[in-house]
Image (tube, rainbow, N blue to C red):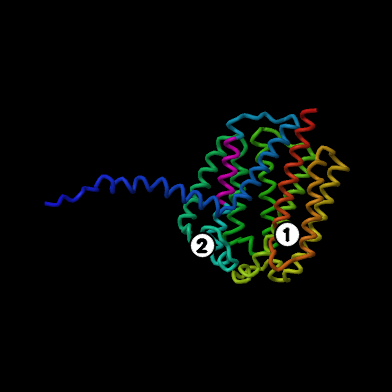
Amino acid sequence: MTVTPHHGPAAGALPGAALPRRAFTVARHCVAEARPVVQLVFLTRFALGALCATAAGGGRPAAWDVLAGAAALYGAVLATYLLNGVRDIAEDRVNGSRRPIARGDLPARTGARVVAGSAVVSLLLAASVPGLAGLVALLLVLGWAYSMPPFTAKRRTASGAVVVTAAGLVAYLAGAVAVHGSMATGPLALCGVLALWMGAVGAVSKDLGDVPGDAAAGRSTLAVVRGERAARHFVAVAAPVLGAAGLAVALLGDPVVLAGAVPLAAGAGWVAWRCLRPRPDRARAPYRAFMVTQYAANAGLAVGLLAVGCA
C-alpha cells in the first residue's frame, strides 16, 4: 500500500509566506516608478528648507515634526510621480522606458491604489505638524494638475514648468514650516532660483529624450512644437541666466549663499554645453547635467549655512 504524503499545511503556508514578498515587490516597483533620484532631491529640498530656517534663528526643530514632515513630503512626492507613471504608460513605452509600469512589472491599477494610499498617509502625517497640511495638500494638488485632466499641465512646456517650479518651492517651504521657522531673504531667494531651475531647465531638458512619446500622446511641448533644436537653445540660454541670477543673489544680497550659487553657475555652463553640442545617442545628457547641478547647488548651500552656523 502506497501512502501519499500530506502537503496540506505546507501548501497552505505558501500564500501567507508569499504575501510579504508580494508587498515588498510592489513597494519596490512603486519606488522605482516614482524615480528615486527625484524623490531624494525633494527630500534634500525639505532638509535644506529646515536648515535655512534653523540658521536664521527662528526655527525650533522637534524630532517628530521633522520626521513626520519629511515622511509626509515623501508620500506626496511618491503619489505625484507614481500617478505620472500610471498616466504615461503609452508614451513611456514609445520612449523605451524601463520603469516598472511601462515594462509590465507593476499593474497600473495597483499603482493607482498606492497613489491613493500614499496621498492619504501623507495628509495624515502632515496634519500632525502645525502649519504643514496646507503645503502638502498643495503639493498633491500640483501633482494632480500636472498629470490629470482637465489641467494636464505636462501637455505644454509653459504650464508644466509653472507646476514644477511651484512644487520645488513648496518643498523648501515645507522644511522651514516643519521646524516652525522662516528662511532669511538670501537663502529664500536662492531657493527660488533653484525652483526656477527645475521649471525652466529641468522640465524642458527632460522633454529632449521624450519627443517620440510626447508627440504620439498629442502633447504640445516646446520640443514637439518647435523641434528639439529650439528646446535645446532655450535651455542653453535659461541655464546661464539662472546661474547668473544665483551669483547675483550672493554678490548683491547675502554672501552666505555663495557656496550654493557657485556650483549652480558652473553647472549652468555644463548644461548649456551639453545642449549646444548634442549627440544623438545622449539625448538625456542635458537633463542629467541639470540633475547633478541641482544636487550640487543644494549641497553647497547647506555647507555654507553650516559653516556660518559653526563659526
Report if residue 77 lies within the magenta region: yes
Is 202 drawn above or below residue 121 in the view shown? below
- Closer to the N terminus: mark 2 or mark 1? 2
Q: What is the tally of numbered marks visible in this picture?
A: 2
Question: Taking 154 as reference, is 182 left or right?
Answer: right
Measured from the top left, where is residue 181 in percent x and y? 70, 33
State the residue position of label 2.
103
| x and y, in percent, of residue 50 in the image | 68, 36
- To which residue does mark 1 refer? 286
Label 1 crowd bin: few (<14), some (14–19), many (20+), radius 10 Å:
many
User: Of helix, strand and loop, which one carries label 2?
Assistant: helix
Tell me the SS state at disc 1: helix
Reply above or below: 67 against 290. Answer: above
Quadrant of the image occupied by residue 20: top left
Which span of residues is magenta-colored?
67-79
Q: In 3D space, how far apart are the residues under numbered discs 2 and 1 (Cα atoms)?
A: 25 Å
